Image (cartoon, helix red, strand yellow):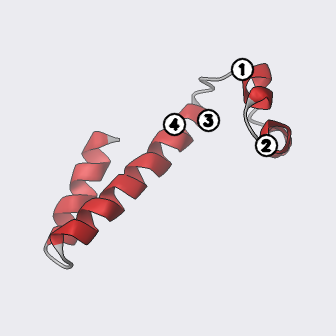
Amino acid sequence: MAICSYFIYSVLSGIIAGKLATILAIVFAVVIYALAVVVLKIFTKEEVQMMPAGDKICRILTKLKIY
């Protein structure tokens, strides 16, 4: 996540303003982190269901055959 975030920041900082590049790099890092948590199955199915809108998330992950 950190490596991808740094790479995105270094690419974007030459193109757009530094503050905007930082914000976009952070958003990209959050997306990568969330995908890693889902793909690596960090949370069990029961833990996902306890989250807000967990039933809906669990149905989506079941359709994608992740859980």
- Mark 4 element type: helix
Q: Nearer the viewer, residue 30 or 3?
A: 30
Measured Cα–Cα span from mark 3 to mark 1: 10 Å
Sequence order check, earlier mark of 3 and 1: 3
Q: Horizontally, is 23 left or right of 18 in the view?
A: right
Image point 23% across, 55% down: which residue?
A: 7
- Spatial CA span between label 4 and label 2: 20 Å
For marks 2 and 1, give the CA distance. 15 Å
What residue is pinned by disc 4? 36
Q: Could you tell me residue 65's position as x and y percent?
A: 79, 38
The CA span between labels 1 and 4 is: 14 Å
Q: Nearer the viewer, mark 2 or mark 3?
A: 2
Q: Earlier in the sequence, mark 2 or mark 1?
A: 1
User: Considering only order in the chain, which callout, 2 or 4, is on the residue closer to the N terminus?
Assistant: 4
Q: Which residue is mark 3?
A: 38
9 up-or-down from 5: above or below: below
- CA gap between label 3 and label 4 equals 5 Å
Answer left or right for 44 relative to 42. right
Please name the residue that numbered disc 1 is placed on.
44
For badge 3, the amino acid type reads Val
- Pointers 4 and 2 in contact (CB under 8 A)? no
